[in-house]
Amino acid sequence: MMKRFEIWQAAVKFEDSDEVKNRPVMIWNDTAFIIAYKMTGTNRGNEKDEFQVIHWKEAGLSKETSIRIEKVLRLERKHMLYKIGDLDPRDQMRFSLRIAQK
């Protein structure tokens, strides 16, 4: 079972086509299906819908990454490729506070 704040590489379908891209996702909930947040290496800063991961190296990510707060995904186990790491506890706290403000 996957745990909240784990970061996994997943096969994620594009919203506007059948194309699939392997990308990191952050797990939020793992019940009948997996709820995860899409992540991106495109730096959009700490805008309203973006959460910049400060400790990205400690999380096992290969480059600066942001969590797309408005891009919640519903995934199945078959979409999950491998575990990358865990969001650093400092970023976990910041993310939790950010979500609570919504």
Image (cartoon, rainbow, N blue to C red):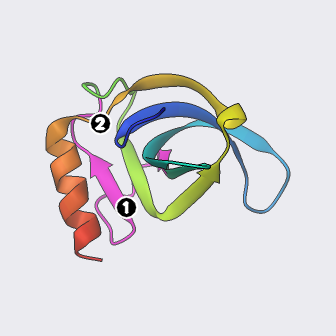
Q: Is the magenta stretch mostly helix, strand or loop?
A: loop
Residue under numbered circle 2: 87
Image coords of residue 76 (percent x, y): 68, 43
Question: In the displayed structure, would residue 95 be above or below residue 82?
Answer: below
In this rendering, position of residue 81 left or right of residue 68 = right
Image coords of residue 37 (percent x, y): 48, 52
Image coords of residue 24 (percent x, y): 51, 37
Residue drawn at (69%, 36%) of the image: 79
Residue drawn at (39%, 37%) of the image: 3
Q: Identify residue type, mark 2.
A: Leu
Secondary structure of the residue carrying tag 2 is loop
Q: How crowded is mark 2: few (under 14 residues within 10 Å), some or many (20 or more)?
A: many
Secondary structure of the residue carrying tag 1 is strand
Q: Which stretch is magenta?
A: 38-56
Q: Do the residues labelled 1 and 2 touch (CB within 8 Å)?
A: no
Q: In which quarter of the image is the C terminus?
A: bottom left
Question: In the displayed structure, would residue 71 be above or below residue 41?
Answer: below
Which of these two is toward me, 41 or 8? 8
Q: Based on the picture, tell me whether residue 79 belongs to the magenta stretch.
A: no
Q: Earlier in the sequence, mark 1 or mark 2?
A: 1
Estimate the spatial distance between the alpha carbons at disc 1 and disc 2, rounded to whole Å: 15 Å
Q: Residues within 10 Å of mark 1 (few under 14, many from 20)?
A: many
Which of these two is toward me, 72 or 78? 78
Residue under numbered circle 1: 50
Considering every residue shown, the one lying at the far right of the view is 18
Q: Based on the picture, tell me whether residue 48 belongs to the magenta stretch.
A: yes
In this rendering, position of residue 71 left or right of residue 90 = right
Residue drawn at (62%, 54%) of the image: 74
Residue drawn at (78%, 62%) of the image: 16
Q: Identify residue type, mark 1.
A: Glu
